[in-house]
Image (spheres, grey):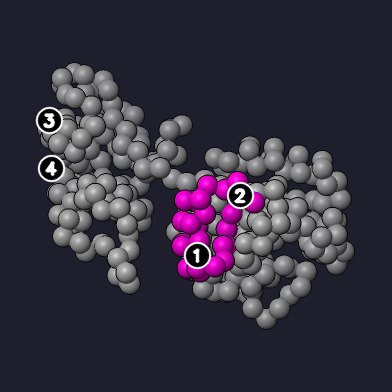
């Protein structure tokens, strides 16, 4: 924790995103005065929200309840846009770790990188000694443990998961007399028949830019039917079934998708979908509100 500075940054950020657990367990407090120590029930906790904005209202409710229960502990809430959080962590680590938070949200995509930099405290024992013991979803626990690259320790408390979702416009499907895309045959048929390039209408939109890999992999594995990423010491990425699935999926580009998809991020995809220019969109449940 920050109250016990050491040469490395390990221990600076105890990554336990379930605030009720994390804050009570890491109530160490470095409020500048040197008062407060872990377990003392007094002090200040700096908390970085790794998806500041969408979850801010929820976190503020949780923090208010926590501070009411522990009136001698102040929580400094710092909302960080999800696109900036990884670089913010890396910058803080490279600067020696003094500016890292006491508690912070960390996604599985960059969890292993922070663990490798010795920046995180494991939360395994904290969970075992808390009311969360035995209550976390087993598959999510295994996923977080694997993402951290450690067979024994966990470096984050799982609180949410992305679920890949294929959204489709029922109005466009109805107008064309197309069945819902509940099979891959229906999906590819709709992608083709909903495309009218002359009118700038397309059956599907591919995620481009930095966020494209995860979604391409979701679509690839969903089509191939391969249910594991690892095969011994090697990955299944280059399995012939996966290669064929990815080639078919990417083959939609500029045929049933806009050419701009090469760089289109999530917000641009959703905007075109909402306007009725796109028939189908693959994204996670985070796009529901949009």
- Name the front one of labels 1 and 2: 2
SS for dot 4: loop
Q: CA distance from mark 1 to mark 2?
A: 20 Å
Q: Which residue is mark 3?
A: 193
Q: Which mark is residue 255?
A: 4
Q: Which mark is residue 94?
A: none
- Name the front one of labels 2 and 4: 2
SS for dot 2: loop
Report the quarter where the N terminus lies. Answer: bottom right
**Residue 99 lies in what quarter of the image?**
bottom right
Dot 1 and dot 2 residues touching (CB under 8 Å): no
Q: Which residue is mark 1?
A: 148
- For this rendering, which residue is in front, 126 or 98? 126
**Residue 183 lies in what quarter of the image?**
top left
SS for dot 3: helix
Question: Residue at 33% across / 72% down in the picture?
Answer: 233
């Amino acid at each position: 924790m920050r109250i016990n500075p050491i040469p490395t940054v390990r221990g600076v950020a105890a990554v336990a995103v379930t605030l009720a657990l994390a804050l009570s367990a890491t109530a160490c407090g470095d409020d500048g005065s040197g008062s407060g120590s872990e377990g003392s029930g007094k002090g200040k906790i700096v908390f970085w929200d790794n998806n500041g904005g969408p979850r801010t209202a929820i976190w503020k409710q949780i923090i208010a309840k926590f501070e009411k229960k522990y009136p001698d502990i102040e929580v400094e809430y710092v909302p960080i846009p999800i696109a900036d959080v990884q670089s913010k962590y890396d910058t803080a680590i490279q600067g020696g770790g003094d500016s890292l938070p006491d508690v912070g949200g960390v996604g599985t995509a960059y969890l292993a990188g922070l663990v490798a930099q010795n920046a995180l405290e494991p939360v395994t024992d904290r969970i075992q000694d808390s009311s969360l013991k035995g209550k976390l979803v087993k598959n999510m626990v295994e996923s977080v443990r694997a993402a951290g690259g450690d067979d024994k320790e966990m470096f984050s408390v799982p609180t949410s998961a992305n679920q890949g979702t294929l959204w489709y416009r029922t109005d466009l499907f109805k107008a064309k007399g197309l069945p819902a895309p509940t099979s891959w045959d229906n999906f590819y048929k709709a992608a083709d028949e909903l495309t009218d390039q002359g009118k700038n209408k397309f059956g599907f939109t591919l995620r481009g830019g930095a966020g494209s890999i995860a979604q391409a992999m979701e679509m690839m594995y969903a089509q191939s039917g391969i249910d594991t990423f690892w095969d011994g010491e090697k990955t299944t990425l280059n399995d012939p079934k996966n290669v064929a699935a990815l080639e078919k999926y990417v083959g939609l580009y500029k045929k049933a998708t806009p050419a701009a998809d090469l760089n289109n991020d999530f917000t641009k995809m959703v905007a075109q979908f909402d306007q009725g220019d796109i028939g189908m969109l693959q994204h996670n449940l985070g796009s529901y509100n949009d």
